[in-house]
Amino acid sequence: QVQLVESGGSLVQAGGSLRLSCAASESTFGSYVMGWFRQAPGKEREFVAAISSWSGGTTVYADSVKDRFSISRDNVKNTVYLQMNSLKPEDTAVYYCAAGPLIATFKRGAPDYWGQGTQVTVSS
């Protein structure tokens, strides 16, 4: 069982930046694909970004965040990050960290493990 704890959510003005972090309990963190999802009020949870296991050589993004968000990982610290730049009010959501075996499962919205979420609010 992988436990995921997100941090870094906050209130920020439009155009600003935030970095979310997700710390994992699992010592085999490096073997997992890691990613982020978000859920805005009244909307379904949606995929944001994912990074492949180990070296993280492959990253994928939702079209809505491409060129603004960047996902990275530190396998020594068992942590995945989401750097969010040029934030927009429509980025307001609870952001969830997730872990799973394949990037394809993230695109289907079905990773194996989920964190509790961290709130990001972007004011206009």
Image: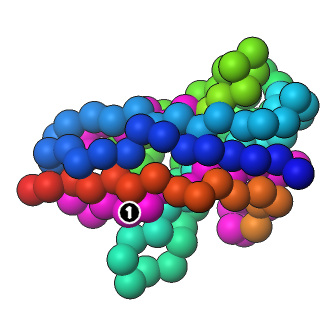
> In the image as oriented, which residue stretches furthest toward the left?
124
Q: Is residue 57 magenta?
A: no
User: Residue at position x 65%, y 29% from top?
Assistant: 79
On the image, which quarter does residue 68 sit in? Answer: top left
Q: Position of residue 17 (x, y in %)?
A: 28, 34
Q: Position of 59 compared to 104: left or right?
A: left
Q: Position of 84 compared to 35: left or right?
A: left
Indicate the colouring scheme: rainbow
Q: Position of 30 compared to 42: left or right?
A: right
Q: Is residue 33 above or below residue 62?
A: above
> In this figure, which residue is indicated by the disc labeled 1?
93
> In the image as oriented, which residue stretches furthest toward the top?
76
**Viewer-proximal residue among 96 and 57:** 96
User: Residue at position x 48%, y 40% from top?
Assistant: 7
Q: Is residue 108 above or below residue 103?
A: below
Q: Is residue 99 magenta?
A: yes
User: Residue at position x 38%, y 63% from top?
Assistant: 93
Question: Which region shows up in magenta?
Answer: 81-109
Q: Position of residue 74 (x, y in %)?
A: 67, 20
Does residue 15 appear anywhere in the picture?
A: yes
Q: Amino acid at mark 1?
A: Ala
The residue carrying pointer 1 sits among few (fewer than 14), some (14 to 19) or many (20 or more) residues within 10 Å by Cα, namely many
User: Residue at position x 62%, y 44% from top?
Assistant: 5
On the image, which quarter does residue 45 sit in? Answer: bottom right
Q: Secondary structure at mark 1?
A: strand
Q: Position of residue 6 (x, y in %)?
A: 55, 44
Q: Is residue 61 above or below residue 25?
A: below
